[in-house]
Amino acid sequence: MGMWLFLITEILLFSGMFVAYTVYRVWHPEVFDMSAELLDWRLGGLNTLVLLASSLTVALSIHYIQNDNRKGLLINLIITLVCAGIFMTVKYFEYTGKFAHGVFPGANFAPHGVANGHDYAAFNVPYAAQFFSIYFVMTGIHGVHVLVGMGVFTWIVVRARKGHFSSEYYTPVELTGLYWHLVDIIWIFLFPLLYLI
Amino acid sequence: MAHAHTTHHGHIHHVPKATLFKVFAALVFLTLLTVAASRVHLGPLNVPVAIGIAVIKASLVVTFFMALKYDNKVNALVMMIGVIFVGVFLTFTLFDTAFRGDLSNVGAMTIADEQRMAAIATGEIEAPTGGHEAGAETGEPATPGGHEAGAAAAMTEGAHTEAAPADTLDAVALLQTYMCTSCHAVDNPNVMVGPSLFDVGSRLTAEEIRQSILEPDAVIAENFPPGVMGATLKASGFYDKVTPEELDAMVNYLAERKGE
């Protein structure tokens, strides 16, 4: 139960940012709608599928260790880590793509250049900067959570290789899994709100 | 941290492997669905559809991947409470932010007065002027002589084929109608955009008051910016609309304002 209590603190952490997004969206719906066009929904969609797959492999790894299948546990944990790495790599390319066109969070917002059929300078309208600040902060903090998750999973993989887990005891895997599913759930909401609508 | 479980306790949440794969398939399908739905223009429905699909996906993850369905019900309660608080957070914040109105309006006039001025300018409502014929008005019944108190709302009055004498004109109503009271307090000493007129009669003569109205920048009250009153009166067309009798009524009234 302690883990679930921790998870709702995490949910409320992200809620603060979701509420900020909602308020600004209600105040400036057209600007937010338009600014979302600069985010590539195909990359966002790919990242969504990647995280969903990683949640599957986490759940599978627990399933296997419940049946004392240490190999199943290990392989699925490693696939989870790989998926997380893919997610961060895609995010890296998304962020650097934005930076190259002057789309920075906060005061340095200065969109310029043409790419993918977008004239970035046309997005230099009032409150577009707010959209991108919210985008960077929300996906940034989410990204930090992914990195932390990767770190914890690495430790779990090390312990799994050492044979610490069995059907009798796999609680750390379970708890890390719960954390990871929450990271996935946050992204399930971030993707449509930022990229799609 | 957690202890090693040496015995199987009652609730082992074994989610069948087939279930996990079916849930994953559903999640992938819903992802494709939400992307497809966003490419279709559903107008105001796009947002609730996207959020609705996201809620379904999240519920699947919580129920099956996180095994909440098979778990101790207390954990489900904890999760439910968290979600409810998110709802409270969002709802009450929106109660404030979605209904703040125009906080960035820091002009000299109130919003209601600005709207009235615009309506007067377009002719939608009449500013009360002594010279207008009955034909210029809406079907309000003719009232001889003075305006009602609070005539600010009912702009059209009965026909005045000749100007009414100054002392029967309601100066208080005129000060409202010409929106003097949106910047100046008249019956209390509070400073608003302009100085209070509460005791103006004890500070200025009637002629000085008249000059303050006709040439506001001739003498500026201390610590107040020049130009504001003049610009406001010009913009509202005050100088074109006010009749000499109305001006007299207001000046005389203000000259009597000597404070308490």
Image (spheres, coloured by chain):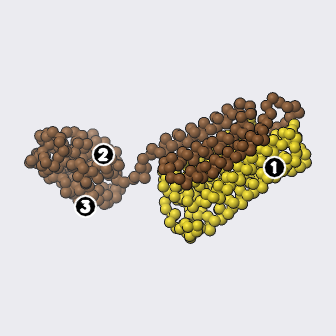
Please provide percent x and percent y for residue A116. 58, 67
Please provide percent x and percent y for residue B24. 71, 46
Please provide percent x and percent y for residue B39. 55, 54
Q: Label 2 belongs to which residue?
A: B185
- Mark 1 belongs to chain: A
Colour of chain A in the rendered structure image: yellow
* Residue at 67% across, 52% down: A48
Amino acid of disc 2: Ala
Q: Label 3 belongs to which residue?
A: B218
Labels 1 and 2 in the same subunit:
no
Residue B199 visible to an observer of this rendering: no
Q: CA distance from mark 1 to mark 2?
A: 75 Å
* Residue at 61% across, 49% down: B33
Amino acid of disc 1: Asn
| Label disc, if present, on residue B9 of the rendered structure | none
Q: Are marks 3 and 1 in contact (CB under 8 Å)?
A: no
- Mark 3 vs mark 1, foreground winner is 1
User: Mark 2 or mark 3: which comes first in sequence?
Assistant: 2
Q: Are marks 2 and 3 in contact (CB under 8 Å)?
A: no
Q: Residues within 10 Å of mark 2 (few under 14, many from 20)?
A: some
Task: Say whether residue B111 is left or right of residue A160.
Answer: left
